[in-house]
Image (cartoon, coloured by chain):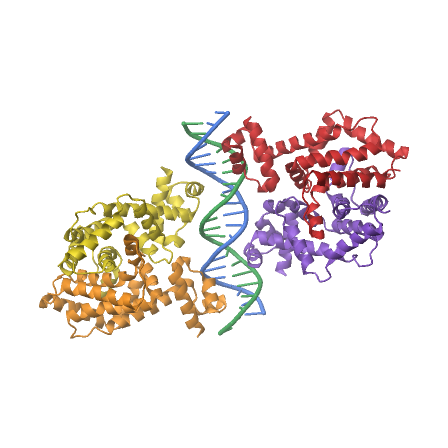
Chain colours: A yellow, B orange, C red, D purple, E blue, F green
Amino acid sequence: MSKEKILEAAREEFAEYGFSGARVDRIAEKAKINKAMLFYYFSSKENLYKSVLKEAAEKLMSQIKSIVTPELKARTFLEKMPEIYIRYFSRNREIVKILGRELMNEDNYYKLIITELLENEERKTPHLIKKLIDRWINNGEIVETDQFNLLMNIISLSVFSFMGKQIAEAVLGIKVKEDKAFFDKRIKSVSNLLKRGMLK
Amino acid sequence: MSKEKILEAAREEFAEYGFSGARVDRIAEKAKINKAMLFYYFSSKENLYKSVLKEAAEKLMSQIKSIVTPELKARTFLEKMPEIYIRYFSRNREIVKILGRELMNEDNYYKLIITELLENEERKTPHLIKKLIDRWINNGEIVETDQFNLLMNIISLSVFSFMGKQIAEAVLGIKVKEDKAFFDKRIKSVSNLLKRGMLK
Amino acid sequence: MSKEKILEAAREEFAEYGFSGARVDRIAEKAKINKAMLFYYFSSKENLYKSVLKEAAEKLMSQIKSIVTPELKARTFLEKMPEIYIRYFSRNREIVKILGRELMNEDNYYKLIITELLENEERKTPHLIKKLIDRWINNGEIVETDQFNLLMNIISLSVFSFMGKQIAEAVLGIKVKEDKAFFDKRIKSVSNLLKRGMLK
Amino acid sequence: MSKEKILEAAREEFAEYGFSGARVDRIAEKAKINKAMLFYYFSSKENLYKSVLKEAAEKLMSQIKSIVTPELKARTFLEKMPEIYIRYFSRNREIVKILGRELMNEDNYYKLIITELLENEERKTPHLIKKLIDRWINNGEIVETDQFNLLMNIISLSVFSFMGKQIAEAVLGIKVKEDKAFFDKRIKSVSNLLKRGMLK
DNA sequence: TATGAATGAGAGTTCATTCAT
DNA sequence: TATGAATGAACTCTCATTCAT
C-alpha cells in the first residue's frame, strides 16, 4: 500500500526531473509517507529508481508479448506494433520520459532489465520475434533484409512519436493537440509507412 | 580560449550526466580552469548549459539548412535528410545525448532555441520547408498528406537511430558495432523506407 | 530467555563498535528477536548498555573477591591477582573491550557500578583489600608505600595486557599468537615482576 | 590555519565522544568554521579522525625516539620510558583517550600508523629498540628473558596509569588529585618497580 | 509477547555559488 | 583574469524509538 504509493509518486517525480533532479523529499511528500519509509522499503534512491524502471519495462513488455504469436504475419506485425506502442505510451506519458532519458545513459539499466525479462520468459519472446523476422525475410514477405534495421525502423517510428513532436512543432511553427484523433492519425501514418515501405 | 575549453568540458559532462547530474567541479577540472572562472564567464550552471545547448542546436540547424533549397524535390529530401542527421549525430554523440534528454523536459529549452534561431533567420528556412512540403503534397509527389506526420516520420527514423539501438539489441540478443558500415547501412535502410513508403 | 539472548547479542555488538557505534537493529538481528522487543525489555539503548556493563562488572568482581580473604598474604596477592585478571579477560574478550572503552569516558558508568557493587556487599571487600594493603605496608611485607600506586601497578600490568599488545607488536615488528602458552607466560612475567619489584 | 583549528577541535571532540559519538557539526562549531570547510580539507569524518590519530602518533613517537640511542642502558631505559610516557600523556589527556579507545578496535588504525612511521624512519628506531632489548637480555642486564613481555610490562605500567585510575579509586573508595606531585609519585613508583623487578 | 510499519530528529556529505585577494 | 577559501542550503540516508495490531 505504502509501497505502491511510493512507486507511483516516484514515477511522477523521476518523469518530471530525471534521476539526479528528482528529490527524495518530494517523493515522500507526494506519497504522503514519512521519508524514512521510502528507505525502509527501497533502501536507496537508486534502488527506488530501478524499481520504477522495472515496473515500467514489465508493463511495456507484456503489451508487446500480447501480439507476438508463432503464426504472426509481417503485415499484422507492422500494423499492430505501432498501435500498441503508441497507445501504451500515450496512456503512460511518465514512462516515455523515464525510458527516454534512460536510453541516453551509457550504462543503460533498462537494457539490462529487458534482457533479464526476456531470459526469464519461457515463451522466449525474443527468440520468437527473431525467428519470425527471419521467416519474413526469407519468405520474401518483407523487403528490408537486415533484422536489426527492420526492428529499428519499427521502434523508431513508434517510440519517437513522443520525443520528436516538439522538434516538428518548432520547425513547422505549429502546435498540435494530443487528443485521440491525433494518436489515431499518427498510428495510421506510421503503419502505412511501414507497410508500404517494407512489405513486398 | 578558456571559454571554449569550458564549453567543451561542459558538453562532455552534460552528455554523460544530464543537467542535474553534471557537476560544476568536474567541468572545471576537465577544462583545467579554476571553478570560479566558470562562473566569471557563464554566471551559472544553467546558463552554461544553455550555451552548450544553443551551440549544439546551431550546428545541427546549419546542417539541415544546407540542403533546403527552393527547388528541392521530395525524393532528394527523403534521401538527404536521414543522411545528414545520421552522419551528423554519429560524429557528435554528445549532442544526441544532450538533445535527447532535453526533449524529455516539459519546458523544453531546445524548442525555444530552434524557434528563436528560425525567427532570427528572417523566417526563411522554416517557411521554406513548410512551403516545400505543401507543394509535394499538392503535387502528389508524396502519399502522406499530413505535414506534421510527414516530418515526424523523417525525424523519428533519423534521430531515433541513436536512441533505439540498445532496445533493438536487447530484443534481438545481439550487439552491433557502430562503424562506418553500420551507419551506411542504417542510412540506406531509412531512406529506402521513406522513399518506398512515402513517394508516389 | 529472549532477554538473555539480547544481552549476549548486545555484549558482542558493544564490544565491537562501542556504545555510539553499536546499532540496535544489529543487536536485534543477532539476537533473532524483533527490534521492538528489545525496547520492551530494556526500554532504551542506554539502559541495555548499562545492563551489559553491570553484568560484566559483576562477573569480574566476583572473580576478584574469590581470593580476597582476611589472612591473605602479599606474596599470594601478587601471584594470584594477575592470574585471575588475565585468565578472566582472556576468556571474556568482549568484556575487556567494553570496560576498556568505558574507562575513557568522563562520566564513567563503570566506576559507579563498582562503587555500588562494593557498597551493596556491606562494604566488605573494598575495606578488606584496603585493610590488607595497609597491613602489608606496615608489616614491611611490601616496599611500595603508597596504597594507590600499589594497586595501580597490579591492575595496569594485568588489564593492559590486552590493550598494549598491538603497540608492542608494532614496535617489535612481530605478531604473537594468543594461545594458552602465551597467557601462561604473560601471567608469569607479570607476577614475577610484581613479586621481585614489590616484595621485601 | 583553518585546517589547524579543525584538527584541534576534532581532537577535543573525538577524545570526548569517540569516533562514532563525535559530531561533525560540533567540530565545525568548535573550530568556528563552516561545516563544508571540514570536508573541503579532510573529505570525510573518518579521514579527519585518521589525521588526528596520525598527528598524535607522531608526537608520541618523537618523544620516544628522543631517548633511544645505541648506547642506551637498560637502567636508563626503565627510568626514562615511564617518565616520558606519563609526562606526555599527562599533558595530552585527549590523546590518551583517543588512543585508548582505538586500541579496543579490531582493525586498529593506530597500529598501522606506528608501523608506517617506523618503516619510514631511517634511524630504524624499532630495530634499534629490538637490538637494545636483545643486548640487555644477552648481557644479563635484565632478568626478563622475553622481548615481548619486557616491552609489555613497561608500556602497561606507563600508559595504563591514565586508564586504571578510576578503577583503583573505586576499589579504594578514594579520590586522587592529578597534580604535579601525583605524576611525580606515579613515575617514581613505576620506574622503581621496573628497575627492582627487572634489573639484575 | 510479538511484529511490521511508522516517525522525527538528526547524521554526514554535496554542491552551486561567492568572496577576498 | 585567476585562485583558494568560504558559505548556506539542500541532499540522501540513518537511527533510536514508538505505534497499531
User: Where the C terminus of chain A falls, by quadrant?
Assistant: bottom left
Image quarter of residue B137: bottom left
Residue shown at 74%/49% (left/top)? D89
The total number of labels drawn is: 0
Which residue does the image show at 63% across and 50% down from the upper left? Answer: D109
Q: Nearer the viewer, residue D43 or B174?
A: B174
- The image position of residue D192, as x and y in percent, is 85, 45
Q: Quadrant of the N terminus of chain A?
A: top left
Q: For this rendering, which residue is in front, C140 or C173?
A: C173
Q: Quadrant of residue A103?
A: bottom left
How far from the left and from the top, in percent, is residue B72?
A: 16, 73
- Inspect this view and state whether residue A2 appears: yes
Q: Position of residue D135 (x, y in %)?
A: 81, 53
The residue shown at (74%, 31%) is C64
Whether residue A11 is visible here, answered yes or no, is: no
Relative side of C43 to B59, left or right = right
Image coordinates for residue A138, horizontal then vertical, percent: 17, 57
Lateral position of residue C97 relative to residue D155, left or right:
left
Choose between A77 and B142: the one closer to the eye.
A77
Relative placement, left or right, of A15 versus D106 is left
